[in-house]
């Protein structure tokens, strides 16, 4: 049975697990938080909302929602090459369900601890289940990675593997059993903070893959005024994805599936040695998947050079067509 408690009790539970940092002058409990930005740093701010039935299936475990809500934001900081520092949390809850909030905090705080992020404030309201997080990171002036720096001649790279989260959703929509490794990638994505930090000063442009590789690379191209050619047969796949999907379906998931939270970045070919060294010293592989070219289109090509087109449009948010 879930225990219904007063709002202030929920906030007390959250406050007890908010995490500490020396640069939090005043955290949860006052009208606003006071944060000490180190001298000579720029503040990097991002926000992402997860709505039940839109961004996650309604029966998703509270702990997974907590993890993912923070992960989506930390992934944005990773894509900017920012060091995470603080976050705030707006919770809209259908009821003051203490067990749900405790579960949510299990996932949220586990990821926050990994990156030494302190929860410094937020808002708690009654309404349909929705979670909005802002994350704050720090970066040296001029060192942030942006979408508008790609140049013709750059290589295009991606971290990790693509398509796992979309593969889990596809299995779930098809009412199949969901592969555990794919499900883990959907429910507990890994923000690529270390990769993002290491890319500062090397990459020309960067974005995190939340809407689908080709769509997100399209955002980089639009911001930079360039085009791209991507080798769809060379996209990195996990062993779990390769085992669960035939090549054609797998390509669709890798090129168009969202929610991977990998980093897609461009870098000059002169950086290949540095990037190889970086990948060798890291647990996260990086793969060269294409090139930036003059123009404004993202072209996907097969290994034999033929053009490749997605069967349907890009990634749609979870659209509620779940099994009863
Ligand atoms: P106010 O009415 O001044 O906005 P609230 O009662 O909403 O104050 O919040 C009291 C304190 O608790 C504030 O410091 C606020 O930032 C914090 N808080 C409220 N909800 C949350 C939440 N979901 N997560 C983190 N901090 C929260
Ligand atoms: Mg107040």
Image (cartoon, helix red, strand yellow):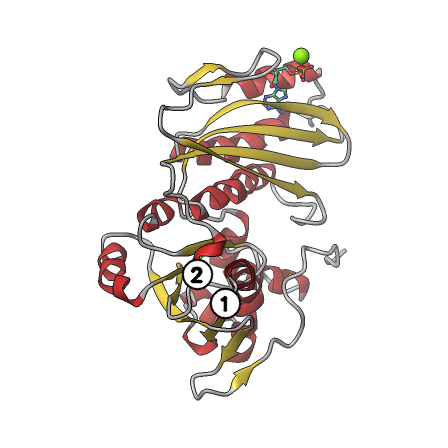
* Total number of numbered discs in the rendering: 2
Measured as percent of width and height from the top left, residue 313 is found at 67, 69
Q: Which mark is residue 133?
A: none
Q: Rounded to the nearest whole Å, what is the CA distance between mark 2 and mark 1?
A: 7 Å
Q: Position of residue 136 (x, y in %)?
A: 49, 32
Vertical position of residue 184 compared to residue 249: above or below: above
- Quadrant in which the C terminus appears: bottom right
Up-down relation of residue 212 to residue 188 (above or below): below
Q: Is residue 287 visible?
A: yes
Q: Is residue 201 left or right of residue 76?
A: left
Which class describes the residues within 10 Å of circle 1: few (<14), some (14-19), or many (20+)?
many
Q: Indicate the position of residue 167 as horizontal and vertical percent values.
A: 56, 64
Q: Does any portion of residue 263 appear in the rendered image? A: no
Task: In this rendered view, identify the residue nearer to me: 88 or 249.
Answer: 88
- What residue do we see at 59% from left, 29% from top? 89
Mark 2 CB lies closer than 8 A to ligand 1: no
Residue at numbered disc 1: 226
Quarter of the picture holding the N terminus? top right
| Residue under the image location 56 percent in, 62 percent down | 222
Label 1 CB, ligand 1: below 8 Å? Answer: no
Residue 24 vertical position relative to residue 200 in the rendered view, above or below: above
Asked if the residues shown at circle 2 and circle 1 are in contact, with their CB atoms under 8 angstroms apart, the answer is: yes
Q: Quadrant of residue 275?
A: bottom left
Nearest the eye: 183 or 47 = 47
Q: Residue 142: x percent and y percent? A: 38, 42
| Residue at numbered disc 2 | 150
First in sequence: mark 2 or mark 1? 2
């Amino acid at each position: 049975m879930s225990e219904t408690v007063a709002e202030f009790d929920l906030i007390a539970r959250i406050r007890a697990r908010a995490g500490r940092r020396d640069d939090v002058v005043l955290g949860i409990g006052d009208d606003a938080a006071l944060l000490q930005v180190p001298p000579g740093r720029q503040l990097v701010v991002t926000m992402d909302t997860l709505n039940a039935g839109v961004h996650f299936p309604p029966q998703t475990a509270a702990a997974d929602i907590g993890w993912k809500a923070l992960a989506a934001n930390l992934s944005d900081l990773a894509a900017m090459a920012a060091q995470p520092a603080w976050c705030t949390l707006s919770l809209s809850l259908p009821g003051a369900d203490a067990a749900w909030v405790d579960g949510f905090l299990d996932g949220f705080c586990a990821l926050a601890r990994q990156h030494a992020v302190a929860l410094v404030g937020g808002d708690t309201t009654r309404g349909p289940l929705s979670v909005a997080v802002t994350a704050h990171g720090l970066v040296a002036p001029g060192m942030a990675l942006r979408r508008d720096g790609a140049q013709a001649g750059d290589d295009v790279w991606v971290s990790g593997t693509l398509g796992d989260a979309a593969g889990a959703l596809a299995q779930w929509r098809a009412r199949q059993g969901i592969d555990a490794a794919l499900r883990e990638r959907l429910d507990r994505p890994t923000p690529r903070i270390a990769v993002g930090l290491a890319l500062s000063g090397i990459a020309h442009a960067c974005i995190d893959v939340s809407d689908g590789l080709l769509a997100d690379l399209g955002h980089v191209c639009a911001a930079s005024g360039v085009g791209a050619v991507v080798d769809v047969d060379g996209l990195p796949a996990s062993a779990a994805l390769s085992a669960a999907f035939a090549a054609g379906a797998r390509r669709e998931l890798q090129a168009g599936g969202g929610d991977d939270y990998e980093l897609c970045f461009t870098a000059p070919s002169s950086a290949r040695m540095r990037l190889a060294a970086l990948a060798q010293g890291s647990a996260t592989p990086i793969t060269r998947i294409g090139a930036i070219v003059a123009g404004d289109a993202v072209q996907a090509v097969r290994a034999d050079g033929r053009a490749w087109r997605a069967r349907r449009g890009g990634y749609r948010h979870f659209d509620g067509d779940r099994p009863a």
